[in-house]
Amino acid sequence: MEPAHDQKPNVLMVEDEEDTASLIKFLLERASYRVVHAKDGREAQSLVESMPVPHIILLDVMLPFLSGLQVLSYIRNKPGWDKVPIVMLTADGSEHDIKRALDSGANDYMLKPFNPRELTTRLQRFLSRPA
Amino acid sequence: MLSDHNSEPVLVQIDASFEPLIPPFMANRNREVGTMTEALAQADYETVRKLAHGIKGAGGSYGFDEMSAIAAGLEQAAKAADPAGMQYHLRLLASYLERVRVVYE
């Protein structure tokens, strides 16, 4: 299934920390994105089964129930979701985890704390690319 | 560098558009200091580690860089199962939260 094309790009944000999620949602909605929020790995998995394919996914590494790396693998094995750009969010920044994520199909990563100005710039790069 | 224990206010400049997000953000941090203090008393280091990890990621994203630095130390102490280190960083965090003054720019 191709991403639905309307004016606002859809973002699936998977982030368990409440205030980080609030800030990301605020920044992205201000930049005219539509944000669907999953609070943990299990909810993310459930949304992958029920929602239309988003334009981009922001995925935290450390999540309750299922880790971000497990969710990443689930997404990449889901028909129609294999090419959705995925940006990992991590507060650890260990090269090992970042390499694992990129090797498992993530397109990019952002370290937390993040620069709010950089967030939308980073996402926009992927939305400007041809599929 | 982390501020030492003192009564000096810590002035932090924050993007004015974030103003509606700051009161709940601060309320959550104050609540978490209580939760982590109780967790430490019960030797529940995993709860301390998880909450400190979240604060580390959130603080600096809003502009509270020192808060992230303190939380990083707290997370490390929790990972090392170091109660004295956790207690030290929890005191630093509580002191920081009492002294921080937000200036919207």
Image: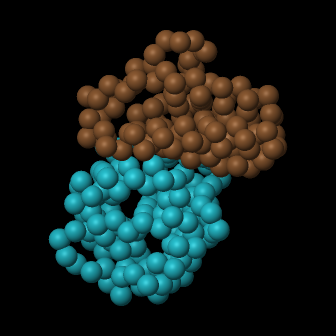
In the foreground, B12 or A103? B12
Is B90 positioned to the left or the right of B3 in the image?
right
The answer to which image quadrant residue B12 occupies is: top left
- Answer whether residue A108 is visible to the viewer in this image: no
Quarter of the image with the N terminus of chain B is top right
In the foreground, A94 or A30? A30
Chain A: drawing colour: cyan
Residue B59 percent location from the top left of the image: 48, 38
The answer to which image quadrant residue B45 occupies is: top right
- Answer whether residue B1 is visible to the viewer in this image: yes
Quarter of the image with the C terminus of chain B is top left
- Total marks shown come to 0
Is B35 positioned to the left or the right of B65 in the image?
right
Chain B: drawing colour: brown
Residue A46 percent location from the top left of the image: 51, 80
At 53% from the left and 58% from the top, the residue drawn is A16
